[in-house]
Image: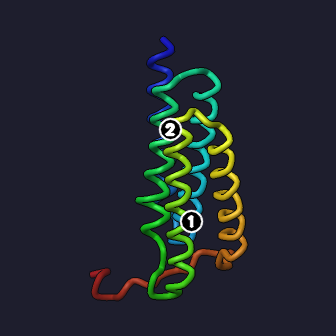
Amino acid sequence: MFGSQLRGARAYEETGVETGVMNADPHQLVSMLFEGARFALGKAMFAMEQGDTAAKGLSIGRAISIISEGLKQSLSWKANPEMADRLSSLYEYMEYRLSQANMNNDRTKLVEVDKLLAELESAWKAIAPKRREKPVALEMPRAAMV
């Protein structure tokens, strides 16, 4: 019974994420990456407290993937190469600390990375572009209506 509820909850979560991604602008997508990495770290901390080594490893691996394949890949090297280089180095540091946390079962390293991600997330949200109150109506060309 609980297994089917868990599968249903996971399917609902995945659908919600997919819907959010499809409707998000690039700034929102990066915000979602921060949220996803921090969520994975929270799950890793919980798993560590419960002594669930497998879940801890999966969650830390998920956080590392989001950082390396999401946040690091989204850096804008053309717009600001110096900032991109600094953030890339910081992301590599986070990946290293998460690997150490996993190997040594060290919660303090998870907390450290979560704090770094929280600071970056806060700064990222502070520079969010202004959103329009009303959606812009798009006119369809007459040729497309025929």
Q: Secondary structure at mark 1?
A: helix
The answer to whether residue 131 of the structure is visible from this angle is no
Q: Which residue is at a point 52% across and 68% down the rendered structure image?
A: 89
Q: Which residue is at a point 46% across and 70% down the rendered structure image?
A: 74
**In-front residue for pair 143/28:** 28
Q: Is residue 3 above or below residue 102?
A: above
Q: How is the image coloured?
A: rainbow
**In-front residue for pair 30/75:** 75
Q: Which residue is at a point 45% across and 87% down the rendered structure image?
A: 78
Residue at the spot of label 2:
59
Q: CA distance from mark 2 to mark 1?
A: 20 Å
Q: Amino acid at mark 1?
A: Leu
| Quadrant of the image occupied by residue 107 | top right
Label 2 packing within 10 angstroms: few (<14), some (14-19), many (20+): many
Q: Which of pointers 2 and 1 lies earlier in the amino acid sequence?
A: 2
Label 1 packing within 10 angstroms: few (<14), some (14-19), many (20+): some
Residue at the spot of label 1:
90
